[in-house]
Image (cartoon, rainbow, N blue to C red):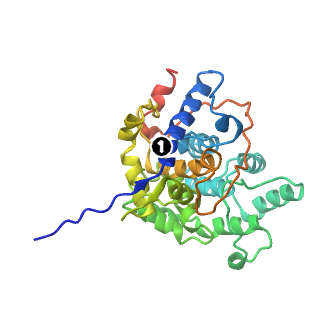
Amino acid sequence: MDILIKRKEPVPSIVLDTYWRFAAERQNIFFNRINGISPLTDDQILIKHKFTNAYRASDRVSQYLIKNVIYNDSSSSELDTLLRILFFKIFNKISTWELVEQEIGSINIKQFGFKKVNKILTEAKQSNETIYSGAYIMTSGRSIFGYETKHSNHLSLLEEHVNPLLLKRIQNSRSLKEVYNILLHIPTFGPFLAYQYTIDINYSNLINFNEMDFVVPGPGARDGIRKCFLSLGDYSEADVIRWVTEQQESEFKRLNINFKCLWGRPLQLIDCQNLFCETDKYARIAHPDIQGISDRKRIKQIYKPVDNKITYFYPPKWDINKYIIFI
């Protein structure tokens, strides 16, 4: 006879309530901006500081990836799409993508050569242009590829690893975790980036997995989890993210919060993972006495309004784009 032993559940701190209130208010800001409602919020922390959206796919860079990188070039082959995604995400900067696209035309396997693109980015760097986003920290890869400059090593990585075999292995994967494990073995990626890139590839038609299948906590999320829970019980950090994601409806009800989801799409594992990272930052001001792992005290990024309006577009397979026009 099998004996079932119930796992000890996590014990929340007061910051978990803040987690849910932050998610709801950040989503309110999203819809207020779309509908032209001002002020966007009366939350002084959110007014002053920059935070990502409650839904990862709603962020400006993710929107650019989905619209302009993945779904904008109907002539792209599947291998072209993989190259486009990984090139864009390694630099994660819209201006870098547009600079290269302006110089070589459509970014695809045929047009994309190491020497050509390396020359463009080297000249940009020499002109003191920032070619990488500060959102992700990537190792240089110098010890592996041998170049003095980080961008040269990363271009060499793309040239060496983006090939039909990698594409086939990704497309033959049976789960999101399998895709992650394939990317994890590419030099310089590491666990956090491999997971982020897995989600980015999953926005495309190359693969089609449920975002509730798998999650990898990043460093910021681990900080947020530490603040949101007094104890994790018998749960891992990944288990906690899943537990929270599955509890979202009852948690919003418990706190009497009217959460405006993404046109019927609830928060997914990747979204709740990101929300832990953002809650860590928010709690530095809202709960300064509660420590995370890194024990950072300040929020570095100040909110600066961006003039160009986003026309939102999500992976068509999510089947939510038809609702956006009714806003």
Q: Is residue 8 left or right of residue 217?
A: left
What is the residue that sits farthest to the left in this orientation? Answer: 1
Give whichever of 150, 42 is nearer the camera: 42
Q: Is residue 152 above or below residue 43?
A: below
- SS category of the residue bearing label 1: helix
In the rendered image, the vertical position of residue 248 relative to residue 37, given as above or below: below
Residue drawn at the location 71% of the way across and 51% of the way down: 298
At which x and y percent is residue 159?
65, 67
Q: Amino acid at mark 1?
A: Asp
For the point 57% across and 52% down, the residue is 277
Residue that badge 1 annotates: 17
Rendered location of residue 197, percent (x, y): 55, 57
Q: Could you tell me which quadrant the N terminus lies in?
A: bottom left
Name the residue located 75 percent from the left edge and 37 percent from the top edge: 304
- Residue at horizontal 73%, vertical 75%? 142
Q: Residue furthest front?
A: 289
The spot of residue 201 in percent (x, y) is: 51, 53
**Depth check, front residue: 166 or 3:** 3
